[in-house]
Structures are given as structure tokens and as C-alpha cells.
Image: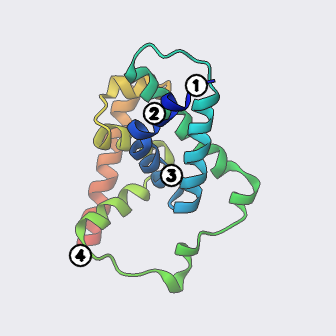
Amino acid sequence: MRSEQEVNRAIDRYADTVTRICMLHLKNRSDTEDIFQEVFLKYATSTLEFESQEHEKAWIIRVTINKCKDLLKSFFRSRTVPIDELPFLQSEKSDHAEGVMEAVLSLPKKYKDVVYLYYYEGYSAVEIAEMLNKNANTVYTLLARARNMLKEKLEYDEF
């Protein structure tokens, strides 16, 4: 079990990353807060010794992604509809940045993680491959396909 100081340091260091990954996958604040707590509780109770700060960050990211996937696969989650998907609550896009984020969120699951880690966290394809247990060439392919999908989606939305 880790000390309170270690846990607080990790929260200070990785809170934004965990929150963004959760929002990318879950698209709502309450589920994000739940997963945030679960990730740092797991960190607090873990006895794993990290080789470096990068190893620790990669572990936090992997745990966050796995917790999000577990929630999305849960029975309750698969039987509900998010309130923002109800037709009468949807609104027009207000600016291009929102449109880009919406386009990223509309990507299939296998592309979201690589796009997020590459563009928002600044990891290389090789580092992403290690984190996600994929071949580096697979990550390059996923990035290329995601870029093409985003390009098509954003070009279509402009007209």
C-alpha cells in the first residue's frame, strides 16, 4: 500500500490525463469521476514498484483505459442511453474545435486510444504499441486510418 503523499503526488501529476481519457471513452462527468476514483484507489493499494515516472504514467493510462472498457461492457451500461443522445437535447456545433472533438469521439473504439495518446499525450507510435500491447506497425496503421476518417468526417461536416 502506498503512502498518502505518494497517492497525492500521483493525483497531482496524472489527474488531467486520467480525466481526459475517461471523458474520451465515457463522454460524461459522473462516470469519469467514478473511474478516476477507481484508478487512484488501485494505485494506492498496488504494491507494484515502478521503474521510472514514464512506467508509472503508462501503468496509470493502461489501468484507466481498462476501467473505462470494463464500465462500458457492464450490464447496466449496455442497457442505458446517455441523456445527451436523446434527439430533443442535441444542439448545433458551435465552433470548429468542438467539431473536431466530436469527430474524434465518433471514431470506433480501437482508434480513439491511439489518437488520444499520439496527439494529446505526445507518445510515439512505438510507445503506444508497448502500452496497448500492439505491434508498432499496427499503431501506425490505426493512426493513418483514423486521420483519413477524421478528414472525411470534417470535410463532410463543413458543407
**Which mark, residue 159?**
4
Q: How many angstroms separate mark 1 from mark 3 (CA)? A: 28 Å
The amino acid pointed to by label 4 is: Phe
User: Contact, CB < 8 Å: mark 4 with mark 3?
Assistant: no
Q: Which class describes the residues within 10 Å of circle 2: few (<14), some (14-19), or many (20+)?
A: some
Q: How many angstroms separate mark 1 from mark 4 (CA)? A: 54 Å
The amino acid pointed to by label 3 is: His
Q: Which class describes the residues within 10 Å of circle 3: few (<14), some (14-19), or many (20+)?
A: many
Residue 113 lies in what quarter of the image? Answer: top left
Disc 3 target residue: 25
Disc on the earlier residue, 2 or 1: 1
**Residue 82's spot in the image, x, y percent?**
59, 69
**Which mark, residue 2?**
1
Please tell me which residue lies in front, 96 or 153.
96
Q: Tag 4's secondary structure?
A: loop
Residue 77 lies in what quarter of the image? Answer: bottom right
The amino acid pointed to by label 1 is: Arg
Horizontal placement of 128 versus 108: left or right? left
Q: Nearer the viewer, mark 4 or mark 3?
A: 3
Q: In the rendered view, would you say 122 is above or below 16?
A: above
Q: How many angstroms separate mark 4 from mark 3 (CA)? A: 28 Å
The amino acid pointed to by label 2 is: Ala
